[in-house]
Amino acid sequence: MALPRNVVFDLYARLALKEGVDTVANTVKVTMGPKGRNVVYKPSLGGPQITNDGVTVARDIKLENTFIHTGAAIVYEACMQTNTVAGDGTTTAAVLTQAMFNGAFKTIAAGANPMIIRRGMAPALVAAEELVRAQAVKVGSRQEIAWIAGLSAHDAYVGELIAEVFERQGAEGAITVDEGRGLHPEVRYVDGMTVQRGFLSSHFATSEQLTEAVLDDCDVLVTDRKLTSLSDFLPFLEAYVGESPKKRLLVIGKEVGGDVLSTIITNHQRGVLKAICIKGPVFGERQRWMLEDLAIFTGGTLVGEETGQPWREVPLSVLGTAKRARATRDETYVIGGGGDPAAINERVEYIWLQQGRAKNNFDREKFQERANNLRGSLAEILVGAPTKVERAEMQHRIEDAISATRAGLEEGVVPGGGSALARAAAQLRIPAGLPRDELVGWQVVRDALCVPAEVIASNAGYDGAVVVDELQTRSGREGFNALTGQFEDLIAAGVMDPLKVTRSALRNAGSAAIMLITSEAVVGDVGSYARWVDYYQPRVAKKYGFVVEESSRRAASAAK
């Protein structure tokens, strides 16, 4: 039975959203910049953690009142989407969302139409993104990679470490981050294959954040069959559980779903076996080839559709092995496959032969990718630190730094420290003759573009408003280096942000802010409604300069 719901409207709906937005953004923004601080949080499982990763902080903020939490959740969504696309820039996304929403808030409270404001914000965001894009420069040297990674991780040593890995593995090389046993991060290169598919259910996840699943010393089943019918597959699964000493199984199938997936998940949760299920990469004939590659790499046999052999007759000897399988939501690494080196080399030679016979560049590239993947190495960055808390915090930073580096190599970089956004604000040309509320939309975006630079400068102990004023008089690649307190050529000084990160943060923040300002009602549970009306609403209204009478308070929050 669904819980009873109630609704808050108008100003009071936006006040609730604002309280949620400000709670998340004000918490996240303390981490921003080279002199930003950390945030301590307590996940639902395990002990306290420390991080300066924006999306991690935003995800862990759970507010008791559902009306207020709705605003927090929308900011988190902007952070999460930025992290998914670019792998970094989540704090910038939160700060920009807050700045744009707050910029429009009082104007709307005074009578401006949010739908017309939206009409101004949408083209302003497009224009601002193009102005940021125009500042980008291409990078590729080892020193530039070290600068990008080091700036993202706030650690020059980590920057050099990642530069070493990228120099060896290439921009698209397979890199994983895992816990180490030492006192400092180090790199280990191991034999491994990468599959561009992630785990099929977060129930397989072994990390506290439910973003990663790991199996050590596991068996590997590779098949080009659809695993959806439990009656067909159950005899093989029962034989595995009954006879395997490991009871750790990576399943890679053409499709894994239905009762088969739910049964494996149930047994995984009960501890009958440990498992990860993933769908085979790509489609069609290429999928079959890559599944054959995986079977050879792990020393197993591909269970093919064409044999027609029922699962009850398939022997466990078809299973391959791996020293480790590590899956995220997007990709899977199979490390230390048990395949015969001679068979692997023979397979690689065959792939190269096929590559030489390919009739177009696309096919040639795909054959080359397969050969490199089958014989390629996997770089493992092992994160060591004196304590578990420090190790987890550093792991977040290194993962963000790898993503930022890839983004920088993909689209180039712009001057860092919020300078690219502030310069876009100075260059933004607002069209003449706009209606008042549409003009407000342009102004909201323009003013918000300056906020990241202001926050970074403030966190470093400088007057953010003064820094922003000076920034807008500078030209070229000049900007404010919050680490040294100097205005200088930021690209030459190694203070740069990946274009992909900056524009993704701006785009997702703009989308979230528009959703927030055009919301006229918020739905929540009855308990939160009573708590909002009697406790939060008068306090939040007073906090933001609104005086609310008792009678009008309840009337405005009542269902219309």
Image (cartoon, rainbow, N blue to C red):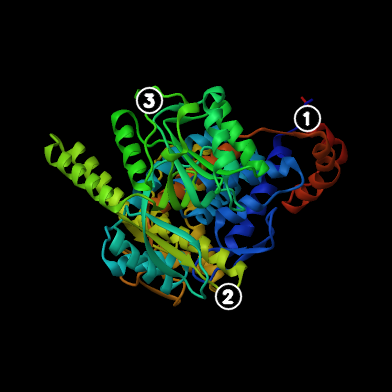
Q: Are marks 3 and 1 in contact (CB under 8 Å)?
A: no
Percent x, y of residue 336? 40, 55
User: Which numbered disc, 2 or 3, marks the residue that appears first in the sequence?
Assistant: 3
Residue drawn at (80%, 42%), measured in percent from left and top? 532
Q: Quadrant of residue 282?
A: top left
What quarter of the picture does the N terminus occupy? Answer: top right
What residue is shown at x 53% (from left), y 50% (from top)?
A: 212
Q: Position of residue 260 (x, y in %)?
A: 55, 29
User: Which three-letter amino acid code belongs to the residue tagged 3?
Assistant: Glu
Residue 5 — which label? 1
Label 2 vs label 1, nearer the camera: 2
Q: Residues within 10 Å of mark 2 (few under 14, many from 20)?
A: few
**18 vs 376, nearest the viewer:** 376
Residue 305 is labelled as 3
Numbered tag placed on residue 94 in the rendering: none
Name the foreground residue: 429 vs 475.
475
Residue identified by numbered label 2: 386
Q: Is 387 on the left or on the right of 257, as rendered?
A: right
